[in-house]
Image (cartoon, rainbow, N blue to C red):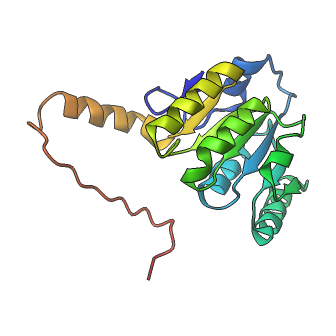
Amino acid sequence: MLLGAGLSMPQILTASDFGAFTRKIGPNDQINYGLIGCKGMGWSNMSAHLKMPQVNCVALADVDQTVLDQRTEDVFKLRGKRPKQYKDYRKMLEDPSIDIVIIGTPDHWHCLNMVDAVSAGKHVYVEKPIANTIEECQIMVKAQERYGKVVQVGQWQRSGSQYAEAIDYVKSGKLGQIRLVKCWAYQGWMKPVL
């Protein structure tokens, strides 16, 4: 099942939602996460998932040791346990205790990371954009179908009811024929370029 922006999804695939697709989980069951790409949206997604008591971060993979060390301490502060560190995400995927991975790497890595993850038996939450080309997307869909793992594309904001209302309004024709759209949304969470 490939989940994306077109579906009415909760803001995050919760531990109980995830369990519905994979196995029966009880209130005391835990889901073990690994994170590939530990800065930016990768960490934002991981820290959001860690707000759910059923979620454990058991492994981090990043090419930058400084980032690995910082995020290891961040997880420790939140949960009292330090996840394993990996400089090579492929080694992390060999860990049988990991149920799901979050992919927060730069866009050009998403396809390879996701295909490797599902082929290793992991479910995946991959940050948007899912890939950079249609061909990469087709490869990813085929991998998901072949290995039967749940894959969700990180489109939390676009799943909100306000977006559904905006889409309905545009589709209603009340704005007339739209020929060009330009938009920008500075949300204050990114560091200024200058």
Q: Is 31 in front, or is 38?
A: 38
**At 67% across and 36% down in the image, what residue appears?**
115
Q: Is 186 in front, or is 61?
A: 61
Q: In x, y percent, where is residue 194?
A: 44, 83
Looking at the picture, does residue 13 appear above or below residue 72?
Answer: above
Looking at the picture, does residue 161 appear above or below residue 61?
Answer: above
Q: Residue furthest front?
A: 135
**At 60% across and 37% down in the image, what residue appears?**
12
Q: In x, y percent, where is residue 6?
A: 43, 28
Hey, which quadrant is residue 174 in on the image?
Answer: top left
Looking at the picture, does residue 50 appear above or below residue 145?
Answer: below
Residue 67 visible in the snapshot: yes
Q: Residue furthest left?
A: 176
Q: In x, y percent, where is residue 105?
A: 63, 54
**At 70% across and 49% down in the image, what residue appears?**
46
Horizontal side of 171 relative to 115 (left or right) equals: left
Q: In x, y percent, where is residue 30?
A: 85, 33
**At 67% across and 20% down in the image, what residue appears?**
146
Horizontal side of 185 relative to 56 (left or right) equals: left
Horizontal side of 8 relative to 122 (left or right) equals: left
Where's the N terminus, which quadrant? Answer: top right
Q: Residue furthest bottom?
A: 194
